[in-house]
């Protein structure tokens, strides 16, 4: 009779089962598909699987309806059991469920797509598929074959599957459904479903010698047959016959525990008619008030629960041999019952379920068919010894115990051979990350590869292509912007429209949500907006933010943070402010004393903590640290000295550096890392850095310097707007994001020897004020104020319209104790006019009145409430 196969995207019929020649042909095709399968993005694979699962969740989906009609004819399970099993398929294929499984078993999904840097170790890792993977599936639970296939797909192997004699239908029905959701063949192009007669040594010899990995699910005979004749490089993953049981302590059965255990074990026994490896066969019940007392309490509840479950999930068909084995167990139990050695409890009609209560020791192998042995034990040592006797075959043990008993008892059972422990009722339901027979199956299907070369630029093209593909599939906002672009095109990025802060406002909650590329569950949210005012919200997965902290730790070490430093974190805490949290997590990864003081408490309290804990490194906003220095000097507080200041969020002038050296003895002032909440960490300063020159965090960010007006790249050495693409952000992709900062590229190699590209920050694009025909640059103002003694570096330019004319006001804060008055105002105005030729010419031509200068006390310039930053440019003109 014709035999149907599926070969890499197409169905194929042969005149009979696969022969050796057909096996060689299929193997050759599978081998040629390895490179393409390995290069497929995990996101594409997950999309196809999730879309397929979503279709199967609908009762009217034609393949589901067909399966419900065909499977009862092929398999022994009842219709309700098949329906219950098919309900599990969409859950198995859910994107988030697969990601949770990958993360739990492999560490990170990103490892499957390329190199991932491990900052703490100075290494990069990736996970590569083993190649051609042969699945030999068991026929006990028909969903098991699909689960095995899915594991091979998400690890990017090319999959060959032997159809089980017990179920020649469902794997083929599943791949047909996959093909409907996979028009490009990214998934089905790496699947071959083959049918050959079990024990055909010629076919098996071809595959044993030619595939890279064999994963066998089945009985002892099947496992043994695949151990011999393997190719030298063939990796065998065997999941042979296993058995499971349960242990119920007297304390665990107290109160509602007995009923919960009974209901749970009735479900565990009924699922798949006890044919799964996780199905219980022997249950140990501890006595607490005399022999048989535990069972006397538990058994009536169990029998009631079994009868209820048998109505909800009727047992399926049994073969003649299976019926004989169950009846033999019943007859033996009746004989022993007459001897007073056991008790038999059976379903009112037929062989729906059987419970045999015994007092003698020994784990009993059930004939299955919902046949459960219940053992009474006075203490738990005998039960543990019985489990140890079957330890090599032991898989799951359901445990009902008191909280005090649970830890010690499960450790003893683990020593006896158990590899998974759960509550009664959960034996068929394996949590993501729980080992299977003591191992993680996904880890068996990949090779872990290390990269000891420090070459982050090498990772960029692949990571960028994956980012663009992911964003175009998962984020509606980016799908519109990336439409028609090939993520693998080296020039694709340059054709993507620039992204602005207004885009972030409009397309993230509360105004929108289509910038996000997935659900926000498990994410952390921060507010950004800084000195420009109204916050916008930025979403990170917990893993993404942990990587931000790991990178920040490396950057702070490069900036001079040393083991043993006593580091005061003076960023503002709370209010969705990210800096304090990021620094706190980064310091936890370094060998220093972490002092999470925060900049939101009073100066006196901050000084008390700094003095009491002998802090020698300060991290925070420059304006806040400057205020601290003024406070220490004005109050003449002793004992507060810092060798290093690491700053972020604002720029630092030469005057500020000099003042911190005088007031606090600071030896070095460096950037803790150039970053923004939206874009992540962009640059860092080494110990040889001067001014605001930074190294790029290569491998994590792509940097472009573009003309703010034309959007075109600027020549080397010229100022341009910093536009970044974060290679880390997948939940909220930030692609070609305009930061608003100005910078220029710095040529040559840094004296520190680092090869990372360098750039010098020059201020903000919006740190240019166009008024009265003059273009005033904030950095010019900062330099001018640095020439006037008695001033702090904090100032504010305000543009307003007064009686129809534009008016410029400059406010600057005076240093504590410094005198100020009209003379000082005139000195400031003169310095300002000298520094800005545009302003001087505008005043001379009468286009603009002389600026109004206001020297105010320290703290006299209003701060942004949320961030406590000074808004350098305020434009109040009517537009």
Image (spheres, rainbow, N blue to C red):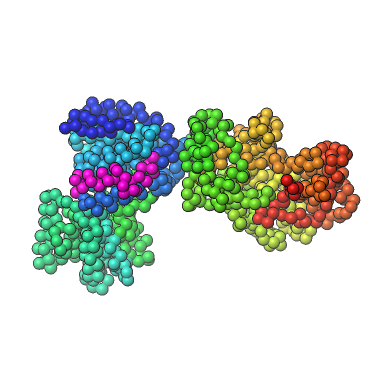
Quarter of the N terminus within the rendering: top left
- Front-most of residues 85 and 555: 85
Query: For residue 222, which quarter of the picture?
Result: top left
Residue 110, how many percent across, how many down? 46, 41
Left or right placement of residue 329 versus residue 142 in this view = left
Left or right placement of residue 477 versus residue 143 in this view = right
The number of callouts visible is 0
Q: What residue range appears in magenta?
A: 48-76
Report the predominant secondary structure element of the magenta stretch: helix
- Front-most of residues 367 and 794: 794
Residue farthest toward the front in the current orientation of the protein: 804
Query: For residue 597, which quarter of the picture?
Result: bottom right
Residue 101, how many percent across, how many down? 39, 47
Q: Is residue 781 magenta?
A: no
Residue farthest toward the bottom in the current orientation of the protein: 289
The residue located at (60%, 51%) in the rendering is 527
Residue 861, how many percent across, how many down? 76, 54
The residue located at (83%, 37%) in the rendering is 837
Q: Is residue 56 magenta?
A: yes
Left or right placement of residue 590 versus residue 223 in this view = right
Residue 235, how many percent across, how many down? 32, 36
Q: Is residue 722 visible?
A: yes
Query: For residue 761, which quarter of the picture?
Result: top right
The residue located at (20%, 55%) in the rendering is 315
Q: Is residue 549 visible?
A: no
């Amino acid at each position: 009779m014709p035999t149907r196969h599926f070969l890499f995207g197409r169905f194929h019929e042969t005149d009979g089962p696969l022969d050796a020649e057909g096996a060689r042909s299929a193997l050759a095709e599978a081998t040629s598909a390895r490179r393409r399968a390995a290069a497929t993005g995990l996101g594409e694979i997950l999309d196809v699987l999730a879309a397929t699962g979503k279709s199967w969740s609908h009762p009217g989906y034609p393949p589901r309806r067909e399966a419900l009609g065909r499977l009862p004819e092929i398999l022994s399970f009842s219709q309700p059991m098949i329906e219950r099993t098919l309900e599990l398929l969409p859950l198995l294929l859910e994107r988030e469920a697969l990601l949770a499984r990958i993360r739990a078993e492999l560490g990170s999904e990103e490892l499957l797509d390329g190199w991932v840097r491990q900052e703490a170790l100075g290494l990069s890792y990736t996970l590569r598929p083993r190649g051609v993977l042969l699945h030999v599936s068991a026929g006990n639970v028909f969903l098991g074959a699909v689960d095995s296939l899915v594991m091979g797909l998400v690890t990017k192997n090319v999959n060959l599957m032997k159809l089980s004699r017990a179920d020649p239908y469902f794997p083929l029905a599943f791949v047909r459904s996959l093909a409907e959701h996979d028009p490009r063949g990214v998934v089905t192009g790496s699947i071959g479903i083959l049918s050959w007669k079990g024990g055909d040594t010629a076919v098996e010899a071809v595959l044993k010698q030619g595939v890279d990995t064999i994963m066998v699910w089945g009985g002892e005979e099947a496992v043994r047959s695949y151990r011999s004749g393997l190719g030298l490089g063939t990796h065998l993953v065997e999941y042979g016959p296993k058995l499971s049981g349960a242990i119920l302590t007297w304390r665990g059965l107290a109160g509602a525990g007995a009923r919960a255990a009974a209901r749970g074990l009735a479900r565990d026994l009924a699922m798949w008619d006890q044919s799964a490896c996780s199905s219980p066969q022997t249950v140990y019940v501890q006595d607490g008030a005399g022999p048989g007392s535990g069972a006397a309490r538990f058994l009536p509840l169990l029998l009631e629960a079994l009868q209820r479950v048998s109505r909800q999930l009727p047992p399926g068909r049994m073969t003649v041999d299976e019926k004989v084995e169950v009846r033999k167990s019943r007859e033996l139990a009746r004989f022993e019952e007459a001897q007073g050695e056991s008790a038999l409890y059976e379903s009112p009609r037929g062989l729906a379920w059987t419970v045999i209560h015994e007092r003698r020791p020994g784990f009993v192998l059930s004939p299955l068919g919902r046949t459960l042995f219940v053992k009474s034990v006075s203490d738990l040592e005998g039960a543990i010894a019985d489990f140890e006797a079957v330890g090599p075959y032991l898989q799951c043990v359901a445990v009902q115990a008191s909280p005090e008993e649970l830890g010690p008892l499960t450790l003893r059972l683990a020593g006896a051979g158990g590899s998974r422990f759960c509550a009664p009722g959960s034996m068929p339901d394996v949590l993501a990350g729980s080992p299977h027979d003591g191992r993680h199956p996904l880890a068996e299907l990949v090779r872990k590869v290390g990269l000891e070369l420090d070459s982050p630029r090498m990772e960029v093209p692949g990571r960028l292509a994956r980012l663009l593909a992911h964003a175009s599939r998962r984020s509606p906002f980016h799908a519109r912007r990336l439409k028609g672009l090939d993520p693998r095109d080296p020039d694709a990025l340059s054709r993507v429209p620039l992204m602005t802060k207004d885009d972030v406002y409009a397309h993230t909650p509360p105004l929108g949500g289509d910038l996000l590329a997935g659900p926000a569950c498990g994410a952390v949210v921060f507010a950004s907006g800084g000195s420009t005012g109204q916050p916008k919200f930025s979403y990170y997965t917990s893993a993404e933010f942990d990587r931000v902290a790991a990178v920040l730790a490396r950057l702070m070490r490069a900036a001079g943070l040393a083991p043993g430093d006593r580091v005061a974190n003076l960023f503002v805490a709370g209010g969705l402010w990210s800096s304090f949290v990021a620094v706190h997590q980064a310091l936890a990864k370094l060998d220093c004393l972490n002092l999470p003081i925060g900049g939101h408490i009073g100066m006196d309290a901050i000084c008390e903590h700094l003095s009491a804990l002998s802090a020698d490194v300060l991290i925070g906003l420059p304006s806040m640290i400057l205020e601290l220095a003024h406070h220490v000097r004005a109050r003449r507080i002793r004992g507060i000295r810092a060798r290093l200041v690491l700053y972020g969020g604002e720029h630092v002038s030469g005057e500020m550096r000099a003042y911190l050296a005088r007031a606090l003895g600071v030896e070095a002032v460096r950037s803790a890392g150039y970053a923004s909440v939206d874009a992540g960490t962009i640059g860092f300063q080494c110990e040889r850095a001067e001014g605001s020159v930074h190294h790029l965090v290569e491998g994590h960010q792509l940097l472009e310097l573009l003309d703010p007006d034309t959007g075109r790249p600027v020549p080397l050495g010229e100022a341009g707007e910093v536009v970044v693409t974060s290679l880390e952000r997948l939940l909220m992709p930030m692609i070609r994001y305009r930061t608003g900062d100005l910078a220029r590229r710095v040529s040559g190699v840094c004296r520190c020897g680092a090869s990372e590209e360098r750039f010098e920050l020059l201020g903000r694009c919006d740190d240019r004020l166009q008024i009265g025909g003059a273009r005033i640059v904030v950095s010019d103002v900062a330099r001018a104020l640095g020439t006037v003694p008695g001033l702090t570096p904090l100032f504010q330019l305000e543009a307003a319209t007064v009686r129809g004319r534009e008016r410029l006001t400059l406010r600057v804060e005076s240093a504590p104790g410094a005198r100020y008055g009209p003379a000082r105002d005139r000195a400031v105005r003169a310095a300002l006019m000298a520094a800005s030729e545009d302003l001087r010419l505008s005043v001379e031509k009468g286009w603009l009145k002389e600026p109004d200068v206001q020297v105010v006390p320290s703290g006299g310039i209003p701060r942004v409430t949320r961030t406590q930053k000074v808004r350098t440019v305020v434009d109040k003109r009517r537009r």
